[in-house]
Amino acid sequence: MCLECGCSVRGNDINGHDHSDEHQKAHEHLHHNPQLNDTKTISVIKKILDKNDLEAEHNRVHFDSKKILGINLMSSPGSGKTTLLEYLAEVADFKFCVVEGDLETNRDADRLKSKGIPAVQIQTGSACHLDAFMVHKGLHNLSLDGIDVCFVENVGNLVCPASYDVGTHLNVVLVSVPEGEDKIAKYPVMFRHADLILITKTDLLPYFKYDVESEKKEARRIKPNVDILEININDIDSIKAVADWIEFKRRMR
């Protein structure tokens, strides 16, 4: 029993991956049955997602009770999620913390802490995404007093994280110029969930074949009302634009 809010928290260490047996079996079953063409697989997955959605709603209530805006950061590995957070800390008027997800190591959480950003690391083991239960435990290992925004930096992956509600209010998806100009079209589920798409590392445009306007058009074909910003860390105004977008969303709640 969670002493802070009375909810059920499974007792593994914060750095241990606590996928339920059902969840792990579903992952294994998915790898063997990628087309999801049998009723047993569909039934197991539905059961897992239903439980996850209940926990996600609990997380949202937790955020709401403390007037915190929750933001799920998603992208493929290396698109710049952690770097964005480091630079946001320099320009944002709001105070934020981070629930950090990776398969192994505490490196990203340690990076953020070295910049004075409150962060907790979730090590997922072999799991390709965070779920609401992992985020819940992470939240109870952070002090949320005085926090305005909580980022959930999801595991680098353009597939699985989009299917798991972790209890945040907004989804921000990063896609970097070096990844090439086909990611939005290839992974539409991820970008369909986005409230904001960040096209990152735009300072590298002279060195890569990447049509920014074409990618924006593709993104808005998938989700017409999505917001899109172009950013790079050498243009601090572009980072400020992200901070302004978040501040606007925070004040509109």
Image (cartoon, grey):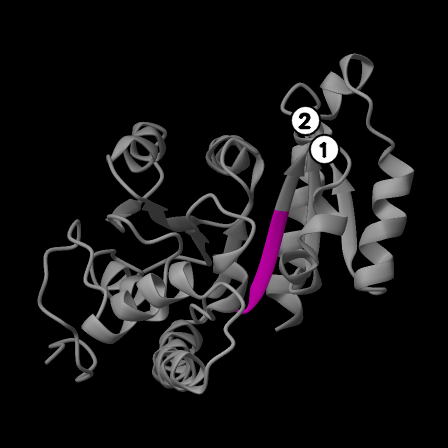
**Residue sitting at x 63%, y 55%:** 247
Q: Position of residue 90 (x, y in %)?
A: 52, 31
Q: Is residue 94 left or right of residue 133?
A: right
**Residue sitting at x 38%, y 84%:** 40
Q: Position of residue 87 (x, y in %)?
A: 53, 30
Q: Which residue is mark 1?
A: 238
Q: Residues within 10 Å of mark 2 (few under 14, many from 20)?
A: many
Image position of 4 with respect to 211: above or below: below
**Residue sitting at x 40%, y 87%:** 43
Nearest to the observer: residue 79 or residue 85: 79
Question: Magenta region's main secondary structure?
Answer: strand
Q: Which residue is mark 2?
A: 232
Q: Is residue 205 left or right of residue 213?
A: left
Magenta segment = 169-173
Q: Residues within 10 Å of mark 1 (few under 14, many from 20)?
A: some
Nearest to the observer: residue 235 or residue 200: 200
What type is the residue that disc 1 sits on? Ser
Determine the secondary structure under disc 1: helix
What's the CA distance linking mark 1 and mark 2?
A: 7 Å
Q: Position of residue 253 (x, y in %)?
A: 61, 73
